[in-house]
Amino acid sequence: MTDTILHMVGHVGTDVDYRRVGSGTDLSTFRLAATPRRWDRAQRQHVDGTTNWITVQCWRALAVHVRDSIRRGDPVVVVGKLKTEQWTKDDVQNSRFILEATSVGHDLARGVSRFRKAPRPVPTADGEANGARAAVEEIEDATAVTSADDGPRRLKDAS
């Protein structure tokens, strides 16, 4: 099977809609706006073309990370599979394109961002995360960069 993979650069045009579907699968969706810009010789300035809008779907862990990281207006780069969603309403066949994201990130050509790795939950016998998760978060917080002026902190070698 051949998938249509593409990347889009644009701005998040709506608030991220997060929900759980089916048997608890995480899903986040948002609308992505991409406006082409070109140089107009006659006007001697850049002019905007027609904005292209597409719905972006993010599943599972990506859905949770997008929910916690992306806001309306953020410049982003989205990579994913182009899909067609079809439905019938009032005996009329409808369709739209969906970009099923495999990766979403801030567009660093337009600003700065700081990455923080999400800790993995440590399951216990009853499926709950235990104190190990808190310990991991405490270690990550202690080694995190506190400001943009500080360089990365390094743990001292134990040898």
Image (tube, grey):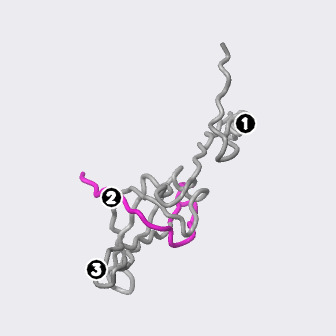
The structure residue drawn at horizontal position 63% and vertical position 38%, both measured from the top left corner, is 151
Q: Any mark on residue 142, and which?
A: 1
Task: From this view, report whether residue 50 is shown above or below residue 20.
Answer: below
* Mark toward the start of the polypeptide (2 vs 1): 2
Q: Residues within 10 Å of mark 3 (few under 14, many from 20)?
A: few
Q: Is residue 8 magenta?
A: yes
Give the SS element for disc 3: loop
State which quarter of the image contains the C terminus: top right
Q: Which residue is mark 2?
A: 6
Give the SS element for disc 1: helix
* Residue 114 or residue 45, whichever sits in front: 45
Gap in angstroms between the C-alphas marked 2 and 1:
38 Å
The residue segment tinted magenta is 1-29
The structure residue drawn at horizontal position 38% and vertical position 78%, both measured from the top left corner, is 48
Instruction: Give the amino acid type for the residue marked by disc 1 in the picture.
Output: Ala
Instruction: Give the amino acid type for the residue marked by disc 3 in the picture.
Output: Arg
Image position, residue 91 (x, y; %): 34, 85
Give the SS element for disc 2: strand
